[in-house]
Image (cartoon, helix red, strand yellow):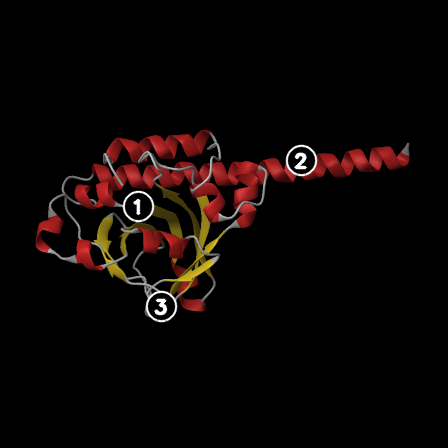
């Protein structure tokens, strides 16, 4: 009887931890969706629409902590969505942004990061277990404004375009030196399995409730007929 009670207690504790982890991920998904919506709703201050329409994948990392940029610790957690064969957005895969250098600093206590992956090669790089921005592929500061791409060749030269938002200011930023890693723990919290990024964004994984909201938000602000 004691053994049974012990097993039940352990199982209950594990379930509580799992539910807590899942809720944290769901809350972060909601935050990522809010960040994207606010960026795209800002009058002539957001990501150019044609870039978003042409993007193969998007990465959103809400609320990176400024202190970590100095000590070289973990920057923050976010999500990556990619377009599938029918041009619809995939379920989100959890990612972590780490590393960088002292020069990689942005004002404000917290900074939101948005990245667009503009071609298949860039998408394949980000689906690796670990990818160093600017080290293994080209990353550039993205232009700001609905019609900004008419004045830049970034759309044609960079695999990855990146932006930051801190204290209400939205601007392109180069993230060279930062490392993007897949987050197997958060994927497991979301989907109940330790899935790799590629398994999520190229497979038939069913998004969670908050994940579906993020997908709907991405679809609302972007469209394209063919890959």
Residue 161: percent from left, percent from top: 26, 55
Residue that appears at 24% across and 60% down:
140
Secondary element type, mark 3? loop
Q: Which badge, 3 or 2, is on the more N-terminal residue?
A: 2
Q: Closer to the observer: label 3 or label 2?
A: 3
Q: Are marks 3 and 2 in contact (CB under 8 Å)?
A: no
Name above or below for residue 12 compared with residue 196.
above
The residue nearer to you, when weighing 21 against 160, is 160
Q: Which mark is residue 135?
A: 3
Residue that appears at 54% across and 37% down:
191
Which residue is most to the right? 1
Q: Which mark is residue 15?
A: 2
At label 3, counting other C-alpha atoms closer than 10 Å, the crowd grade (few under 14, some 14-19, many 20 or more) is few
The residue nearer to you, when weighing 4 against 49, is 49
Residue that appears at 37% across and 41% down:
32
Q: Closer to the observer: label 2 or label 1?
A: 1
The Cα atoms of the two marked residues, 1 and 3, are separated by 20 Å
Query: Is 21 on the left-hand or right-hand side of 176?
Result: right
Query: Is 187 on the left-hand or right-hand side of 68?
Result: right
Q: Which badge, 2 or 1, is on the more N-terminal residue?
A: 2
> Splitting the image into 4 quarters, where does residue 125 fall?
bottom left
Name above or below for residue 47 compared with residue 161.
above
What quarter of the picture does the C terminus occupy? Answer: top left
What quarter of the picture does the N terminus occupy? Answer: top right
The residue nearer to you, when weighing 29 against 159, is 159
Q: Which mark is residue 56?
A: 1
């Amino acid at each position: 009887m004691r053994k049974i009670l012990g097993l039940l207690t352990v199982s209950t504790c594990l379930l509580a931890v799992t539910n807590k982890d899942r809720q944290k991920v769901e809350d972060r998904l909601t935050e990522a969706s809010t960040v994207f919506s606010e960026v795209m709703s800002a009058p002539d201050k957001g990501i150019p629409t044609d870039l978003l329409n042409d993007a193969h994948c998007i990465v959103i990392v809400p609320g990176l902590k400024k202190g970590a940029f100095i000590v070289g610790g973990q920057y923050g957690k976010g999500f990556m969505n990619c377009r599938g064969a029918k041009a619809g957005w995939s379920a989100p895969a959890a990612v972590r942004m780490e590393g960088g250098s002292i020069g990689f600093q942005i004002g404000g206590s917290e900074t939101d990061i948005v990245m667009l992956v503009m071609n298949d090669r860039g998408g394949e790089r980000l689906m690796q277990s670990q990818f160093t921005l600017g080290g293994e592929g080209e990353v550039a500061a993205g232009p700001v404004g609905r019609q900004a791409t008419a004045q830049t060749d970034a759309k044609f030269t960079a695999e990855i375009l990146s932006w930051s938002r801190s204290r209400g200011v939205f601007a392109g930023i180069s993230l060279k030196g930062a490392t993007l890693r897949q987050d197997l723990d958060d994927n497991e919290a979301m989907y109940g399995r330790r899935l790799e990024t590629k398994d999520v964004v190229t497979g038939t994984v069913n998004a969670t409730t908050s994940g579906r909201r993020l997908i709907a938000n991405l679809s609302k602000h972007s469209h394209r007929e063919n890959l």
